[in-house]
Image (cartoon, rainbow, N blue to C red):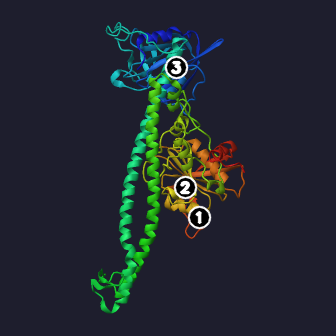
Amino acid sequence: MSLNWKEIDAVIAEWDLEGSRLKRIRQPDYSRIILEFSSPGASSAVVLVIKPPNVRIHLLSGALPKALPRPPRFSAVIKSRLEGLKLERVFQYGCDRIVRFVFLADDGRLFLDAKLWGNAPNIILAREDGGTSVVIDAFSRRPGRGEAPGELWPPENIGKRGNAQGRQFSLRELPGEGSWNSRVENYYRRLEREQNSQAMYNLWERYLELRESYLVHKARSLSENVSRFSLQSGDALWGEICMANLHLVKKGDLFLEAEDWTTGGTVRIPLKANLTPAENARYYFNRQKRAARALERLKKDEQIVQDDLKDVRSLLQKLKDFALEAGDAKEGGSEEVGSKYDCAKDGGGSKGGFSEDGTKDGAKEGDFSKAGGSEGIARGKNAAEEHVAGASDSVRLLFSGPPPAEVSGRGWLNSGGASGSERSLSESGGKKYGLNLPGLWVFKPPYTIAVGRSAAESDTLLRKWAKGNDTWLHLRGRPGAHVFIRAPKGKSIPLEILLDAGNLALSCSQKNKLEESSMHYTQVKYLRRLKKGKTGAVIPTQEKNLHIKKDNVRLQALRELAGLQKE
């Protein structure tokens, strides 16, 4: 729940910010703004959180989270207007949970108001206009509430309604020691970790249940196909009977009744009226061969699906058992085991894990040559089984990030591999889990990177896997690996993924032995294949440039994940 007005007063009472200057404004995500104040010999950081239900304001301790690469609209406005100004005063409007920061500017006072209402929080920048103030901009523009540029602010009844319509409020008994600000900070940090853990549990539970449902349906479909092709496995006998009784068959006949020497009885064989007797015999010989090949593939696929289904059910049970263990530990007052289930406590080097301040952290990527890639570069089935069978720490690491974006079709579960972390499929892994494609595969949810390490691999990936909106990357003016990046619909490729792809292109282009190179990238739909050209040769258009320096630390990290030694 959000802070009540008395708790907000207690937070502000511990501040000593009047007279300090607003050094910097940073926005680490889309629900928080941090104000960094400095004064001679001291500095402080105030965080404004407007994400229900944990709306709050308090001082921040420790290292501050990184700001977004590009400031959003409101953040850019207040940075241009407020940074460097002197704070005159900070106070709460009566009992209305609106905290006003008053700044002295050359042309009058500027106000930054944090509206800390649990159901409609907002941050509003206003300027002094006579005896009133006028909104310059708002974090969330709401004209119906008077929270839009040009509106008068605050409304007339703000600060004049008494003790919140007569309701009684008091300071909660928050755990821990130290100042009220530090207890508020620690309380909400722990609360958000628990909420993140529960949300992550729900995502994984839904993912595994959907995956289980898909695999059950797939197993049923494969079983039906096995039964159908099994009936055709005896077609060679029908072909032999047709060949032995060609003299009894005329073109246009629909059936052949002849002796079945394997049983001593009579068999009735359907014929195609448009085929000659000999062609009908060849038809049954060919159908038997096709059925034999299909049965071989289907039985392999059936075994793979059964193995996947077993692993999914094992993971689902492990997830539920561990959730119960964490819940029991929490009820028993033990924070040690409960924190192990807490995905936010420690990302565990996993991509998509959350650190304590809510920012993402992740392990760095690694290096793979063609030989190394065939070994697999991330946790595969063996590692998954090790995690599933391991202690609670291993399970926490296994579920430390969100599940893969694709829950069906491509077999991305990897038999329960470390889905929150970087994950890859080697050439054999790609074939095993339904891709049936060559190349080096790296899965970093929700992005997929496929590398064609040779002309043949690149050509196959381009023709059989790549889609028009996928991104293609290649060394500029040099032969080398083709790298394809697939992102979820509506998402752009972040710089980190481009750097991964660029380092992959360098490390997989062994003939060049380059430490750095210029590259170009574009969408697959802007590639044109050369008629009668070399295999894999394409001409890109609308490409963009990228210069990559080989990052050995980044590359070696993934090699270590795979248990590969540095060459």
Using the numbered discs, state the Cα–Cα distance from disc 3 to disc 1 in whole angstroms. 56 Å
Q: Which residue has dot 2 on it?
A: 429
244 shown above or below 36: below
Q: In terms of sequence position, does the residue under pointer 3 or pointer 1 come before the other? A: 3
What amino acid does circle 1 point to?
Ala
Secondary structure at badge 2 equals helix
Q: Dot 3: few (<14), some (14–19), or many (≥20) neighbours within 10 Å?
A: some
- Cα–Cα span, label 3 and label 2: 44 Å
Residue type at the position of mark 2: Gly
Amino acid type assigned to the residue bearing label 3 in the image: Asn
- Secondary structure under tag 3 reads helix
In the picture as drawn, the residue positioned furthest to the bottom comes out as 247
The answer for how far apart the CA atoms under marks 1 and 2 are is 18 Å
Left or right of 520, for residue 445: left
Give how far across and how far down residue 491 sits, in percent: 48, 43
Read off the residue under disc 3. 186
Q: Which mark identifies residue 456?
A: 1
Of residues 121 and 130, which is closer to you in this image?
121
